[in-house]
Amino acid sequence: MSQTSGSGGEGHPGTPIGPGELNLMNSRARELLLKYWDFRLFGGALRRHGIDLGDAVVLDAGCGSGYSTSLIWEMFRPRELLACDVMPEQVERARARGLPATVFVGDITSLHLADRSCDAAFVLGVLHHCSNWREGLAQVARVLRDGGVLLLEEPGKQHIAFERAILGWTYTCDSGFNLEELRLELARVGLAVIEEKPLYFGLFGSFLCAKMASHTSARYVVARRLLRTLSTAGDMAASHQVPA
Ligand SMILES: C[S@@+](CC[C@H](N)C(=O)[O-])C[C@H]1O[C@@H](n2cnc3c(N)ncnc32)[C@H](O)[C@@H]1O
């Protein structure tokens, strides 16, 4: 499975993150944070809501060096694990871990996966690197089945300002990404926030979301309710009729 990058921007053509941040992302420090902070939050949220990923098809979108993918495997043992990243060098690193996962080059803003083919998706610090982050979120919502869950973490304004100052240009500068916009967009693509917690002392937000039933099925439910009400009203009217 392979996809080409559609995320190139004017500032950094073809590369969503610069070398400085890439080193940081692939560092042991990041791995320790992921293991002892981010994934503890995710594990707790899933447990609190009784969600078991043991029989799930799970996607790690923007898997980086594959460390997040390895934690998903260790902690949740999903039936099937998919992982993608837009940077081929990251995919090579992830593949080198030898995980029981299908690891491929893929762009979150144009995922080549079937509609409703995943039970869960992890998207960790990826959207704010995308020029078209709204489409990235829409793609994740598309590949999740109704009732499927999204484990998401993204930085807020303060961290983005810090990232820009330290690392220079980032996509977030152009794309209008911030946590307020993210919350609105989650609702717009049909992902309900079940739980939101601050991460890294509030510099990031950590979210557990669930995909609501499609608009079609929502309309179907409303139509059925209406029919039931009408037929109950009809029955009541009939039972109150005095025979001629
Ligand atoms: C902050 S790192 C996170 C990596 C890993 N999920 C983790 O938590 O350590 C962001 C990753 O997203 C990837 N990425 C950025 N834009 C992407 C896109 N449009 N589609 C897929 N991956 C993307 C980058 O290549 C990078 O590996």
Image (cartoon, rainbow, N blue to C red):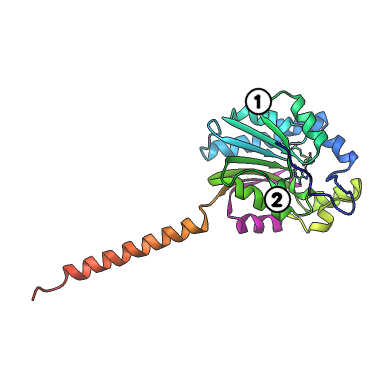
- Helix or strand or loop: what does disc 2 sit on? helix
Query: Which three-letter amino acid code belongs to the residue tagged 2?
Result: Gly
Q: Any atom of ligand 1 within 8 Å of the CB at mark 1?
A: no
Q: Which residues are magenta?
A: 180-208
Split into 4 quadrants, where in the image is the C terminus? bottom left
The residue lying furthest to the bottom in this view is 244
Query: Which three-letter amino acid code belongs to the residue tagged 1?
Result: Pro
Q: Badge 2: how crowded within 10 Å, few (<14), some, or many (20+)?
A: many
Which residue lies under the disc numbered 2?
A: 136
- Count of all numbered marks drawn on residues in the image: 2
Question: Residue 110 or 25: which is nearer the viewer?
Answer: 110
Residue 36 in sight here: no
Q: Any atom of ligand 1 within 8 Å of the CB at mark 2?
A: yes
Left or right of 83 in this view: 192: left
- Residue 25 in percent (x, y) is at 81, 36
- Residue 75 in percent (x, y) is at 62, 28
Is residue 126 part of the magenta span, yes or no? no
Which residue lies under the disc numbered 1?
A: 100
- The residue shown at (77%, 25%) is 96
Q: Badge 1: how crowded within 10 Å, few (<14), some, or many (20+)?
A: some
Among numbered discs 1 and 2, the one appearing first in the sequence: 1
- Residue 55 in percent (x, y) is at 53, 32
The residue lying furthest to the top in this view is 98
